[in-house]
Amino acid sequence: MTSKELRNAWIRFYEERGHINIGAVSLIGDGTTGVMFNVAGMQPLMPYLLGKEHPSGKKRLCNVQGCVRTVDIESVGDPTHFTFFEMMGNWSLGDYFKQEKTQWSYDLLTKVFGLDSKEICSTVFEGNDAAPRDDETADLLKKVGILPEHIFYLPKSDNWWELEGTTGTPCGPDNEWFYPRHNKPCGPNCGPACGCGRYVEIGNDVYMQYVKNADGYSPLANKNVDTGFGLDRMLAFLNGVTDGYKTDLFIPVIKHLEEKSGKSYDDDPEAQKAMRIIADHIRTSTMLIGDVKGILPSNVGAGYILRRLLRRAIRYTRQLGLESSVLAEVSRIFIEQIYDEAYPLLVEKKDYILDEIMKEAARFEATLATGMKEFTKCITGIRRKNEFMAQKDPSYKPETEISGKQAFRLYDTYGFPLELTEELAAEEGLTVDANGFAEAFKEHQAISKQEGAAKGGLTERNEETAKLHTATHLLQAALRKVLGDEVAQKGSNITTERLRFDFSFSRKMTPEEIAEVERLVNVAIDAKVPVVMEEMTVQEAKEKGAIGLFESKYGEKVKTYKMGEYSFEICGGPHAANTGDLGSFKIRKEESSSAGVRRIKATIAPKA
């Protein structure tokens, strides 16, 4: 079965049973869940599982949702770890429950995927003092055809879902489906929980039938079902392979890398690891850049993760003896051959995606060679010191750590993410002083703030700079309205003559966009609304919708400045008393400041 056939089979199966295909949402977190990326298929649906009506008005939903998890990037290179993957899901929002879902999961596995019903295994919740054993699901499993000896009762850690640290939220037992890879048990108690690798988890059905209270659980009136089956894992299993890179999601890319490098994926372990890392990281990078909320490489937040993925991929292309241009070739294969149907936006943004990948490759290539030389010097220095000291003192304990200052120099001068230095060090049997790196980073920030105090904001405080500073608030609000929430302030510089405002945005603004931003600022000025300052906590400011920047420097209380319906920001001042004091606003120039950052220069003048 191909990936396209599997994806379509899942959607078709549940549509035939009254579900609506809600499609996939952005991979980029919306800020409501506390994570950068969507890490599970159900994550975007949490508001509806908690009781909010879905916009479709339907109670039966299904989709195939892309996810990104980057907590174990270093594990990528083995047969099973991916940073991007897809979850096939279906949900009941207070509609059907265990009986229907058990039957459907069984039918899907046996009738659609052709699995032997006598081999399928399932795990259910064994019960504890807070909630009873899930005998209901076990009985339903037996009725549909699962052998009693293939039903395993496992503890809460294995077969229970809830939001940790919350109360008043739905939770409940889950039923996980397994299938044996072979018929050679590791012992008399061999089962899905023994960890011997005999059983592969196919997917799970979560039954949200309780409310989590401070002192336990109580029955939930509006019961939900949340199903998740991993597409990548299921595809490998159905095709009889244990290496996830041997499905059609990766085979064209692996073949291309073999042809370009002249190395064999199956016969060269080092080349195999490199090909897996390149394939995985470029797939994820392609998805993130080509997302509806597409991001670009940067040194902060999600952009930093993207930069780290791309730079790690670049390093492994060098191990294969290839130029970094191969990264764009790999991305093109994912866009044109593998995900063209499932993610048509990638096709629309193809040229943009390939261009951004090559830009980042060019940036890193410029410093990678010299950075590697510096890293080698660092390693050589440690080894020479160890040899010298061992000769002088036989009891000397050799150094095994790269200092934080050395790691920071690699970061600051050569663009090496700390994780890259740690990975390179591990290959040499060394560690990195991460705490020392953090201290060096803080020292650098402090010095930069002192040196750039004048450059970063107001050069002096007077009536004119206060007005221009107020204008930056209105400018940011207008930019976000015209260009979207991608816009965030990256810096400003204000003199008595003009303001300079740097903001995150991935392309040059059009003349029409510039004109509209200028118009919106002048509308706010013409409204002559008072600039109202109020002190509150950061949390209160967020809840009221204030835009907050550089939050690490805030104390318990912050000042907020509200200008009617036009702007609401956390800020330290100074400001004009009324937007009408600003006169007339004019954008003089829009240009690039750095990668992914644009710059606007503007002036204000009394109205004629």
Image (cartoon, helix red, strand yellow):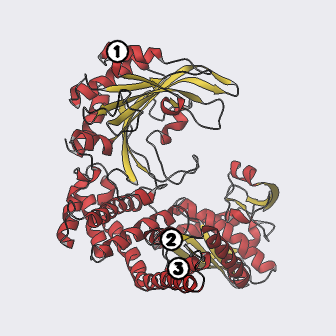
Quarter of the image where one finds residue 272: bottom left
Q: Position of residue 401 (x, y in %)?
A: 56, 73
Q: Nearer the viewer, mark 2 or mark 3?
A: 2
Mark 2 → mark 3, Cα distance in angstroms: 16 Å
Write the residue at 70% across / 81% down.
Answer: 447
Q: Which mark is residue 430?
A: 2
Q: Which residue is mark 1?
A: 142
Left or right, 395 with respect to 580, comes to left
Q: How many marks?
A: 3
Label 1 vs 3, first from the N-terminus:
1
Graded by Cα atoms within 10 Å as few (under 14), some (14 to 19) or many (20 or more), the crowding at tag 2 reads: some
Q: Secondary structure at mark 2?
A: loop
Q: Amino acid at mark 3?
A: Leu
Q: Secondary structure at mark 1?
A: helix
Write the residue at 51% across / 66% down.
Answer: 304
Quadrant where the image shows the N terminus = top left
Residue located farthest toward the front when viewing the structure as drawn: 394
Label 2 vs 3, first from the N-terminus:
3
Q: Which residue is mark 3?
A: 410
Write the residue at 65% across / 35% down.
Answer: 166
Q: Amino acid at mark 2?
A: Leu
Left or right, 202 with respect to 297, comes to left
Q: Position of residue 397 (x, y in %)?
A: 59, 74
Left or right, 575 with respect to 282, comes to right
Q: Secondary structure at mark 3?
A: helix
- Residue 91 in view in this figure: no
Q: Which mark is residue 461?
A: none
Quadrant where the image shows the C terminus = bottom right
Mark 1 → mark 2, Cα distance in angstroms: 54 Å
- Residue 38 in view in this figure: yes
Q: Are the residues at dot 1 and dot 3 in contact (C-beta closer than 8 Å)?
A: no
Q: Amino acid at mark 1?
A: Lys
